[in-house]
C-alpha cells in the first residue's frame, strides 16, 4: 500500500520556498499546435530540461552522460502506444529537485538501443501532490490545494499506473481521456471517429514520430470541431488509432488529451483528493 498525505511527504520529499518554475514550450508542428513542455530539474547536481509527461507511468532518463554510471536496481518492460515493449533498467537518483520540491531516492527508467530521447517527469513523481500546469503564463508549481474560487471536478485514476483521466465530451458523447502533456497531439480511438465520421476532416499523415520504445508511428491526422467539454475547440487536431491494446491496460479510456489541446490553458490537479479544475 502506497504511503499518502503527510506520511508520503515526510518519507519522500521536502518543499523549499520557491517561485513557480518556468515551462519551456517547444512546437514540433506549429500549424497543428503539436509540441511539448519541459521544466528545469536537478538530478544529483546535474541540471536537465525534463519533459513534463503526465501520461507516462514512469519517469525516464537519457542514457548519455552521468546516468550511465548508476547501477541498475531492477529491470522492467516499457510499453508504448504502438503496442511494442522493450526491456529497460531502473536506476535510483538520490536527490531530485523540481519546482522547489526535493524527491529522495527517486526511480528513473533508463533504456538502451535506442536510448530514451528525453528525460521526463512523469505521473509517478506527481502522485500525492497538488499542482498547477499554467500554459497561459508558461509555469508549473506544486501547490497546497486548488484555489477555492475554482469549481473542481472528480478525476479517475486509470490503470495500475493510476494516470490522470478526465471526462471529455466529443461529438456529443462523454469519453474518458488520459491527460497527457507528453503526447504532442490528441489521440482518439477509431471507434469514436467511426461513430460520427462526418465530424472529422482528414488533413495529413504524421510520419517519423516515435514512442517511448523507439517504434516509429504513422498516424492519420484529422481536424474536428466536435469538442464541447471541458472546452470548445475549433479545428482541433487529433490522430486516430486503435485503442484496443490501450484499453486492456486502461479500461474505459477512449483517447488521450494531448499537448495541442492542453496548451494555452491553465490546469489544476489535486492527486491527493483526485479532483481537477480549469483556471482563467
Image: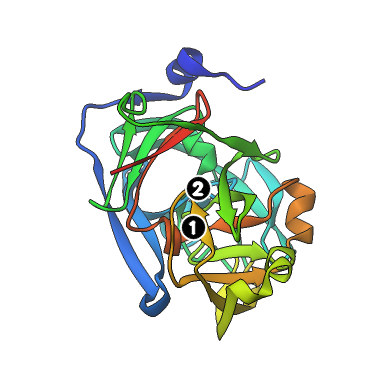
Q: Nearer the viewer, residue 198 or 189?
A: 198
The kind of secondary structure element at disc 1 is loop
Quadrant placement of the C terminus? top left
Q: Dot 2: within a 10 Å radius of its alpha carbon, few (fewer than 14), some, or many (20 or more) residues?
A: many
Report the disc number at residue 182.
1
Residue 44: quadrant of the picture: top left
In the rendered image, the quadrant that contains the N terminus is top right
Q: Earlier in the sequence, mark 1 or mark 2?
A: 2
| In this rendering, position of residue 95 left or right of residue 55 | left
Q: Is residue 207 above or below residue 112?
A: below
Up-down: is 15 above or below 5?
Answer: below
Q: CA distance from mark 1 to mark 2?
A: 6 Å
Tell me the number on the disc at residue 214. none
Give how far across and how far down residue 189 sits, in percent. 69, 63
- Secondary element at tag 2: loop
Q: Residue at x 31, y 53 (%)?
A: 135
The residue identified by callout 2 is 54
- Does residue 162 appear in this view? no
Q: Nearer the viewer, residue 177 or 49?
A: 177
* Residue 244 visible within the image: yes
Residue 213, picture quadrant: bottom right
Residue 277 location (% of width, % of height): 41, 37
Amino acid at each position: 500500500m502506497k504511503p499518502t498525505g503527510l506520511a508520503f511527504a515526510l518519507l519522500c520529499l521536502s518543499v523549499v520556498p520557491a517561485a513557480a518554475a518556468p515551462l519551456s514550450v517547444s512546437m514540433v508542428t506549429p500549424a497543428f499546435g503539436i509540441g511539448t513542455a519541459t521544466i528545469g530539474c536537478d538530478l544529483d547536481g546535474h541540471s536537465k530540461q525534463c519533459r513534463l509527461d503526465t501520461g507516462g507511468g514512469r519517469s525516464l532518463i537519457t542514457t548519455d552522460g552521468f546516468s550511465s554510471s548508476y547501477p541498475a536496481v531492477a529491470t522492467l518492460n516499457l510499453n508504448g502506444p504502438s503496442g511494442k515493449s522493450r526491456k529497460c533498467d531502473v536506476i535510483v537518483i538520490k536527490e531530485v529537485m523540481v519546482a522547489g520540491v526535493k524527491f529522495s531516492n527517486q526511480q528513473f527508467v533508463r533504456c538502451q538501443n535506442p536510448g530514451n530521447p528525453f528525460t521526463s517527469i512523469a505521473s509517478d513523481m506527481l502522485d500525492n501532490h497538488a499542482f498547477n500546469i499554467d500554459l497561459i503564463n508558461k509555469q508549473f508549481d506544486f501547490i497546497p490545494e486548488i484555489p477555492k474560487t475554482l469549481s473542481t471536478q472528480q478525476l479517475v485514476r486509470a490503470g495500475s499506473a493510476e494516470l490522470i483521466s478526465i471526462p471529455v465530451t466529443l461529438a456529443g458523447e462523454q469519453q474518458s481521456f488520459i491527460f497527457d502533456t507528453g503526447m504532442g497531439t490528441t489521440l482518439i480511438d477509431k471507434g469514436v471517429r467511426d461513430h460520427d465520421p462526418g465530424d472529422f476532416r482528414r488533413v495529413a499523415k504524421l510520419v517519423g514520430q516515435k514512442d517511448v520504445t523507439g517504434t516509429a508511428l504513422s498516424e492519420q491526422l484529422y481536424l474536428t470541431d466536435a469538442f464541447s467539454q471541458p472546452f470548445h475547440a475549433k479545428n482541433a487536431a487529433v490522430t486516430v488509432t486503435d485503442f484496443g491494446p490501450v484499453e486492456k491496460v486502461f479500461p474505459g479510456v477512449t483517447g488521450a488529451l494531448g499537448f495541442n489541446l492542453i496548451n494555452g490553458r491553465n490546469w489544476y490537479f489535486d492527486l491527493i483528493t483526485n479532483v481537477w479544475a480549469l483556471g482563467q
